[in-house]
Image (spheres, rainbow, N blue to C red):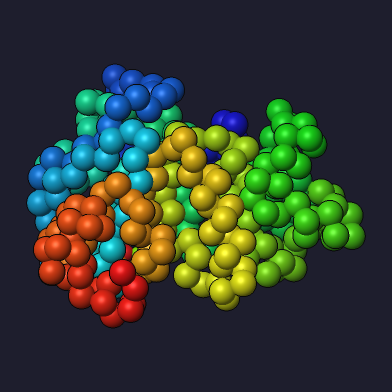
Amino acid sequence: MAAFNRIEEIWHAPVTVQDFENAETKTSFNSEISFENVSFQYKNAEYKALQNIDLVIPKGKIIALVGSSGSGKTTLTDMVLRFMDPTEGRILFDGTEIKNIKVGSLRSLITLVSQEPTLFNDSIRNNISFSSSIYTDEQIKQAAEAANAWEFIQASENQLDTNIGDRGMKLSGGQRQRLTIARAILKNPPILILDEATSALDSESEKLVQEALHRLMIGRTTIVIAHRLATIQHANIICVMKNGMIIEKGTHESLIKLEGEYAKFVSMQGLQ
Ligand SMILES: Nc1ncnc2c1ncn2[C@@H]1O[C@H](COP(=O)(O)OP(=O)(O)O)[C@@H](O)[C@H]1O
Ligand SMILES: [Mg+2]
């Protein structure tokens, strides 16, 4: 598990955040993550990528972020993972400012599934278990089944011992994504961040991945960035982002009634 988190951090972290001397270790997620008037500006950027974000993410809920490219969706989720600290405002995790939580322990509670899965030139088993020997083959198999990955694993030459090639190049995009989901199911984190996890896939493999993601989301808190209405409309809270701000926030129904940007987005997709 420790190795898993370390690799995840190294892989994603652009960054310079450091643990404060008295930072506490978090081992569970109990109530909510909240953004209080958070703004963020990348170094050398002319504009703020996030402006005055106020948002409460309650445990067990699905929060969807929608908005055009560059509106700040990924930046917002990166701040939950503490890849960088706010320029203004603060982010609280169960009431504790995340700056005061050990960053490794914070990230061990969160799994990020993004467009480009992080896979290694190694066996399917090691890719799912992150080379940890604490899992049995039966546990790995169950996770793969829940992730709609077992069928192709079983059909491959050496099953769990099959090498997937550099960054998983021997697999299709959907298969790579499903291995990542199997890994997440095994890791069993309370919080998920799905950043356009299905947008690079064709519709057949999108269906399998979507199904696996739905299973993964059960019983967790999810922040989902998606373009497809089918994914978004069941969220408990939908945030519409524009120029780094949340310009609309509510349920699908309430935002349709508002007849603003979200309603326009929905009518463009032709679904209601
Ligand atoms: N590493 C970075 N350095 C400088 N600017 C960045 C960086 N990442 C994103 N940005 C800028 O921040 C804004 C928000 O980007 P992002 O959060 O990626 O938006 P989205 O995920 O909604 O497409 C954009 O203007 C983008 O160009
Ligand atoms: Mg993005």
Quarter occupied by residue 185: top right
Q: How far across and how far down the image is residue 8, in percent? A: 52, 45
At x 70%, y 54%, the residue is 149
Q: Quadrant of ligand 2?
A: bottom left
Does 191 sit above or below residue 263?
A: above
Residue 85 seen: yes
User: Above or below — where is 101 with respect to 157?
Assistant: above
Which quadrant is the C terminus positioned in? bottom left
The residue sitting at 50% across, 65% down in the picture is 198
- From what the image shows, is residue 44 above or below residue 215? below
Task: Tell me: 128 left or right of 207.
Answer: right
Relative to 200, 56 lies left or right: left
In which quadrant of the rendered image does the N terminus lie?
top right
Residue 115, horizontal then vertical, whole percent: 49, 64
Closer-to-camera residue (72/48): 72
Q: Residue at x 64, y 50 (%)?
A: 147
Residue at 65% x, 46% y: name it: 146
Left or right, 140 with respect to 241, comes to right
Quick check: can you spot residue 87? no
Closer to the camera, 46 or 202?
202
